[in-house]
Amino acid sequence: MSATVFNGAAAEAEPRPATPAVTASTPAVTRPAAVEKEPECLRLKGAEACVGPDGSDRPGITIEDTANDHFHPAVEYYLNGYLGTKYVIHNLGRGGEVRGNREIGRIVTFRAALYEGNHRVKFGRWKTVRNMTKYPIKRETRVTPAEARARAKTCTSTRGAATVCFGEQNTFVFACDTGADKYQARAQYFIAGDPSARFEIHQLAGVNTCGKAEHGDLAVSMYRASVYNHNRRVATRLYKYN
């Protein structure tokens, strides 16, 4: 049965957010962009990633599995022009199903990718869209691991190098890098008891920095902290249940 769930490493090719053109014909007064715009989508064979406004058929950021094969699609994205934190949503459902997260920023830079297990086998070009939601989440880049622990309900760590913390009132998740090394901290987690969509936060900005994701009123159901060397996992804990 098809279902839709809206939840919440330096990139190989860093996205370059595009500057929207302004022309003399641009009207002085327009309706809100979130009302006028349709979802912006990117497609690969087997995947379609979209960013859309509230009220559309694809609000927030979504990834659809468009092929019945042994690959699964994912959408990789950055928020608010900040490249220090990358987000990934893996759609582990069957062909035709959609997974995503309603909580997006004013600027979203995203691309579609295909995975075989945990190995990415294909990815598309980056695209940047702006002002898709009426109430975008704000950029939050100055949180330290100590501050994340103080604000969170639950935290877990892996070998002193990666920490995941989360709270469940307007659910947020922090992924913090606590090791002064070449490795990258990641949070990997599931939302609302749904095993068919895995969320990841890749914290790229270095030691004592945290990346944050928001998921509205949907609670974290399973989570772990991991450490990666590029795309190779070098340390992790077993998933914990919330």
Image (tube, helix red, strand yellow):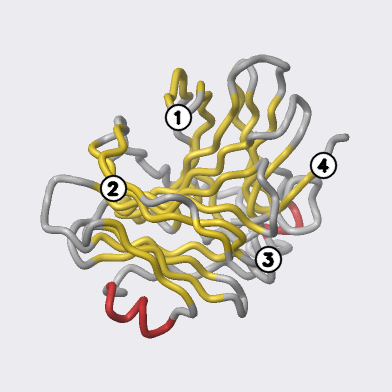
Lateral position of residue 201 relative to residue 40, left or right: left
* Residue bearing mark 1: 118
Q: Quick one: label 3 or label 2, which is nearer the N terminus?
A: 3
* Residue bearing mark 4: 3
Tell me, for residue 218, which label it has, or none: 3
Query: Quick one: SS at disc 3?
Result: loop
Q: Quick one: label 2 or label 4, which is nearer the N terminus?
A: 4
As measured in the structure, the alpha-carbon distance from the residue carrying label 3 to the one carrying label 2 is 25 Å
**Mark 3 burial class by Cα count in 10 Å: few <14, some 14-19, many 20+:** some
Tell me, for residue 227, which label it has, or none: 2
Label 3 or label 2, whichever lies nearer to me, is: 2
Q: Quick one: label 2 or label 1, which is nearer the N terminus?
A: 1
**Mark 4 burial class by Cα count in 10 Å: few <14, some 14-19, many 20+:** few
Q: What is the x, y in percent for residue 34?
A: 70, 58
User: Residue furthest toward the bottom?
Assistant: 150
The amino acid beneath tag 4 is Ala
Q: Do the residues labelled 1 and 3 touch (CB within 8 Å)?
A: no
Tell me, for residue 25, which label it has, or none: none
Instruction: Identify the residue at image location x=67%, y=14%.
Output: 69
The amino acid beneath tag 3 is Leu
